Amino acid sequence: MALINPHINFNGNAEEAFTFYKSVFGGEFAKIVRFKDLVSPEFPAAENDAEKIMHIALPIGGNILMGNDVPDFLGRVNENENRSKIAISAASREEADQLFHGLSAGGTIEFPISDSPWGSYFGMFRDKYGIEWMVDFDPKYSDFKNFTDK
């Protein structure tokens, strides 16, 4: 079965955002590549882009959260657009609370985490970097084996 690994574009603060995400999820970065690390005649990098992140990866469970800074020549990412949300399926209510409160710190709560009308424990927010998240715990799927058996 394929995994879904979200990839997020940033306007020069990818490293800051990923350091924050790492503080919530834990773990270590699998990879950090800066534009200066790839400079060659075929791939020149502007001086103001040299220290920016070309690729960063943070393993989270069986998935990988990836991101990069957009180089100046490509223009800025519209951080106020309606981006796709990153959905997290938590293994417990406690984990859902920890992830929701950790990631939403400094952000905007769109739907406070609580029991939802559809029977799960759910919350939705935009983090302080403008990324939209949904956190869900559904007791029917608390062990992911049951999810694949349905």
Image (cartoon, rainbow, N blue to C red):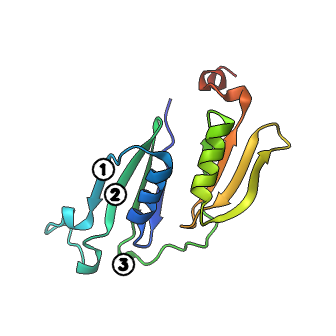
In this orientation, which residue lies closer to the viewer: 148 or 134?
134
Q: Is residue 129 above or below residue 113?
A: below
Circle 3 — which element? helix
Find disc 3 in the rendering and name its residue: 72
Marks 1 and 3, the one that precedes in the sequence: 1
Circle 2 — which element? strand
Question: Which quadrant would residue 150 be assigned to in this image?
Answer: top right
Q: Amino acid at mark 1?
A: Lys
Q: Position of residue 57 (x, y in %)?
A: 38, 50
Q: Amino acid at mark 3?
A: Asp
Classed neighbour count for the residue bearing mark 3: other residues with Cα under 10 Å, few (<14), some (14–19), many (≥20): few
How many angstroms separate mark 2 from mark 1 (CA)?
Answer: 7 Å
How many angstroms separate mark 1 from mark 3 (CA)?
Answer: 22 Å
Q: Is residue 105 visible?
A: yes
Q: Which disc, if any, is residue 2?
A: none
Marks 2 and 1, the one that precedes in the sequence: 1
Circle 1 — which element? strand
Give the residue at the far right of this rendering.
Answer: 117
Give the residue at the far left of this rendering.
Answer: 41
Q: Position of residue 130 (x, y in %)?
A: 57, 67
The number of discs equals 3
Find disc 1 in the rendering and name its residue: 31
Residue at the image point whose x is 33% and y is 46% from the top: 30
Find disc 2 in the rendering and name its residue: 55
Q: Position of residue 48 (x, y in %)?
A: 28, 80
How many angstroms separate mark 3 from mark 2 (CA)?
Answer: 15 Å
Asked whether the beta carbons under mark 2 and mark 1 sit within 8 Å of each other, the answer is yes
Q: Mark 1, mark 3: which one is toward the viewer?
A: 1
